[in-house]
Image (cartoon, rainbow, N blue to C red):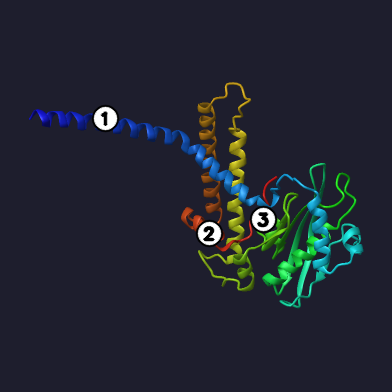
């Protein structure tokens, strides 16, 4: 009996210790969860803005070598590569047909061209609309051609030539408006020995074999696409307004502490959730939908990779 009593006491002590540890774990998880959710939310936006992220540079000499390689591989003359001469008027949109073994009709149009000139980098960013018989091989050839042209640009104040190039190919102007839903892209930062080309094969397949349009909830696909954009705008609006009401607490702010930071973040996330629900409920009422039907349209848009509205400034 005595040994049983000792055993029960031991079990009771262990149970109390386990309960205390579990309570502490739950308590800390409750405190940290809003921060984790904020990080996940920030990661999603970073993914949407991936086209605008550039790395710091290291060596300029590599660009000189790449210029020679680009000129040789593209078959362009040194004069066109080095001078970067263009036949169109400044600001005029370019249209061209690029013949290749994969396709005889790839049309492209430069929608936007940005040049950044600073002591850090000489950067060229192109947003390009591509149409016609799209093939991965033809997209890669086009990216290499545009890359050679970008590397041949001159007239930078701090660098002898281009150090950074980012080229994004879009299959429609709607996708281009989002600025990240590209079908193929090329990136080359200062420290890269050669450019990297990425093709979004899922998006390319959707262009080649578009899905069948269906009627759902009495709405055509075109109408559901419009509602999907309204949903994204509502979420962006809720996020922006919650950050104005409860701005991020910076370490330099008076009274800053980890607890104060987490408390402010929790309020911000709570306000964002409240506003999002309010705006989505209003959208559902506006279109005669239930909240479940609105959520289903949002899921459909994400699943089918529908064009999103431009990111807010």
Which residue carries the number 1 mark?
Answer: 16
For residue 288, say whether it is visible: no
The C terminus lies in quadrant = top right
Judge whether residue 199 can be spotted in this image: yes
**Left or right of 283, for residue 49:** right
11 horizontally vs 298: left or right: left
Numbered tag placed on residue 297 in the rendering: 2
Q: In this rendering, which labeled residue sits more in front, label 2 or label 3? A: 3
Query: SS class of the residue under badge 1?
Result: helix
Q: CA distance from mark 1 to mark 3?
A: 53 Å
**Residue drawn 57% across the image and 71% down it:** 211
Rounded to the nearest angstrom, the CA distance separating label 2 from label 3 is 21 Å
Q: CA distance from mark 2 to mark 1?
A: 49 Å
Number of numbered discs visible in the structure rendering: 3
Q: Residues within 10 Å of mark 3 (few under 14, many from 20)?
A: many
Where 14 sits versus 278, above or below? above
Q: Is residue 204 left or right of residue 267?
A: right
Q: Quadrant of residue 138?
A: bottom right
Q: Residue at x 70, y 56 (%)?
A: 177
Q: Which mark is residue 180?
A: 3
Residue 196 x, y percent position in the rendering: 69, 59
């Amino acid at each position: 009996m005595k040994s049983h009593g000792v055993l029960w006491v031991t079990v009771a002590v262990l149970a109390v210790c386990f309960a205390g540890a579990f309570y502490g774990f739950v308590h800390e998880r409750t405190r940290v969860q809003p921060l984790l959710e904020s990080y996940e939310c920030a990661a999603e936006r970073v993914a949407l803005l991936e086209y605008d992220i550039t790395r710091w540079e290291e060596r300029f000499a590599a660009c000189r070598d790449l210029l020679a390689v680009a000129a040789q591989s593209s078959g362009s003359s040194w004069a066109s590569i080095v001078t970067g001469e263009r036949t169109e008027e400044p600001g005029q949109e370019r249209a061209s047909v690029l013949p290749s073994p994969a396709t005889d009709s790839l049309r492209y149009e430069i929608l936007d061209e940005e040049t950044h000139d600073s002591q850090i980098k000489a950067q060229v960013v192109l947003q390009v609309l591509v149409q016609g018989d799209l093939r991965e091989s033809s997209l890669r050839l086009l990216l290499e051609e545009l890359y050679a042209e970008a590397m041949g640009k001159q007239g930078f104040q701090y660098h002898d030539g281009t150090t950074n190039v980012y080229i994004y190919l879009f299959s429609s102007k709607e996708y281009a408006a989002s600025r990240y839903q590209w079908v193929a892209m090329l990136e080359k930062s200062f420290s890269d020995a050669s450019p990297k080309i990425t093709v979004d094969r899922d998006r390319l397949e959707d262009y080649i074999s578009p899905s069948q349009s269906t009627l759902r909830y009495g709405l055509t696909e075109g109408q559901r696409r419009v509602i999907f954009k309204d949903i994204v705008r509502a979420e962006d609006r809720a996020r922006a307004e919650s950050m104005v009401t409860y701005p991020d607490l910076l370490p330099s702010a008076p009274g800053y502490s980890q607890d104060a930071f987490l408390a402010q973040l929790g309020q911000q996330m709570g306000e964002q959730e409240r506003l999002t629900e309010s705006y989505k409920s209003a959208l559902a009422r506006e279109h005669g939908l239930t909240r479940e039907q609105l959520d289903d349209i949002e899921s459909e848009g994400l699943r089918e990779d529908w064009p999103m509205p431009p990111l807010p400034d």
